Image: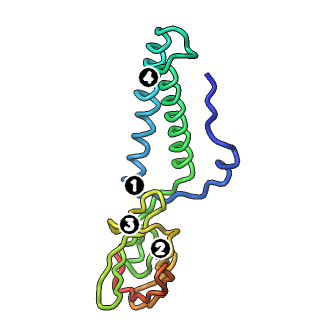
Amino acid sequence: MFVRLFDLSLLLNMTKQYLTKERHDVLVQELQDLKNSGRRAVAEKLKRAKEFGDLSENSEYQEAREEQTYLERRIQELTEILRTSEIIKKDSNGGAVVSMGSKVTLQRDGKSFIYTIVGSNEAKPTEGFVSNESPMGKAVLGTKPGDKIQIQTPKGKSDYLIVSVE
């Protein structure tokens, strides 16, 4: 039962992942579920598929093996994310400076935008969660209310004012 998981070079190049406590807990639970019930379910499928006979022409067996490969890859991926992760702690600077986990209110052309700075694993820009690795995230980290920033976007440069930091 050999499953090729990851190229070692990929594992060595993993960077630190920033996660909220909530996201960390979700990933830990997913990992536990996959290791326990996920592996049992796949083992049962493999066992049933073997009962159909000739494995070379057994589509149920091939499908179960593919599912096993996917499951083991996801377990490895989650293990590596959790190994390299750092939980975002609420900053004690009282909202003076934008840091990981900060909720930032920006203003551009009279419109307000509110973003929370999170790790790339949790980024959902349309929902207001911006990665610290994105142009927006990089630009706001370390700023404080009253600062002006400029961000290069596909449509050109945009100027923003940092209104508040929570």
Marks 1, 3: nearer the viewer = 3
Q: Which residue is mark 3?
A: 129
Name which of mark 3 and mark 4 comes first in the sequence: 4
Q: Residue at x 39, y 89 (%)?
A: 161
Dot label at residue 21: 1
Dot label at residue 104: none
Q: Residue at x 61, y 30 (%)?
A: 3
Quadrant location, the C terminus = bottom left
Distance from Cα at disc 3 to Cα at disc 2: 10 Å
Q: Residue at x 43, y 19 (%)?
A: 45
Distance from Cα at disc 1 to Cα at disc 3: 15 Å
Distance from Cα at disc 4 to Cα at disc 2: 41 Å
Dot label at residue 40: 4
Give the crowd class for mark 3: few <14, some 14-19, many >=20 residues within 10 Å. many
Give the crowd class for mark 1: few <14, some 14-19, many >=20 residues within 10 Å. few
For this rendering, which residue is in front, 139 or 95? 139
